[in-house]
Image (cartoon, rainbow, N blue to C red):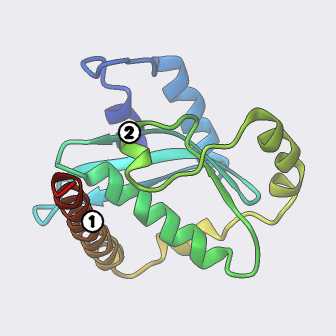
Amino acid sequence: FETVIERCGDPARRGHWITAEIVEAYERLHALGIAHSVEVWDADDQLVGGVYGVSLGALFAGESMFHSARDASKVALVGLVTLLTEERTAGKMLIDTQWQTDHLASLGIEEWDRERYLDGLPALTSTNPPDVARWAAIEDPSQRLRSALDELYAWYRSTEGMRANLLRDIDSL
């Protein structure tokens, strides 16, 4: 967790906003079992991507992501969605990404207006939280992330095909 938040807070990153005080606060939240991260490790056991945030009931408020290998932050987000979806098969959940970026739009996020978000918070936060202790006990998390990466690349391939077909159709007009 600590390395993910530190990498997200790298002062060399464009738009740097994560201060030492924020890192310290989130490390305390992590120690209390409220803040969590999903990490992506490469074949050489190097941390190449991650996402961290706060889990309150059925709400995961994502704070930041980083990557040092192409698409590793997307893989971390897909891994987070996979873990949370497994926990919430019987109910609703929300991952708050704070805003829609081209990067997040490429993963299919849905933007909510403020009223909808605020109306949904009481039900989301009063639900039992996910069993994050189970996440740490996954015997081979790299296998789960490999599966998530395979899904992501399959999605990319399918959208590239759709884009190519769309461009071909436009060209034929």
Q: Quadrant of residue 45?
A: bottom left
Q: Position of residue 137 (x, y in %)?
A: 48, 76
Q: Quadrant of the C terminus?
A: bottom left
Residue 162: give its label. 1
In the figure, is residue 61 to the left or right of 117?
A: left
Which residue lies under the disc numbered 2? 102
Q: Position of residue 103 (x, y in %)?
A: 36, 42
Secondary element at image label 2: helix
Above or below — where is 48 with respect to 21?
Answer: below
Quarter holding residue 42: bottom left
Q: Where's residue 29, x and y in %?
A: 63, 40
Q: Tell me: residue 158, above or below residue 166.
A: below
**First in residue order: circle 1 vs circle 2:** 2
Q: Residue at x 70, y 62 (%)?
A: 93
The residue nearer to you, when weighing 44 against 148, is 148
Total marks in image: 2
Q: Judge whether residue 136 can be spotted in this image.
A: yes
Q: Tell me: residue 151, above or below residue 162.
A: below
10 Å crowding of disc 1: few (<14), some (14-19), many (20+): few
- The amino acid beneath tag 1 is Met
Please report the residue visible at 77 percent of the width from the left and 58 percent of the height from the top: 57
Q: Crowdedness of circle 2 by 10 Å Cα count: few (<14), some, many (20+)?
A: few
Residue 150: percent from the left, percent from the top? 26, 75
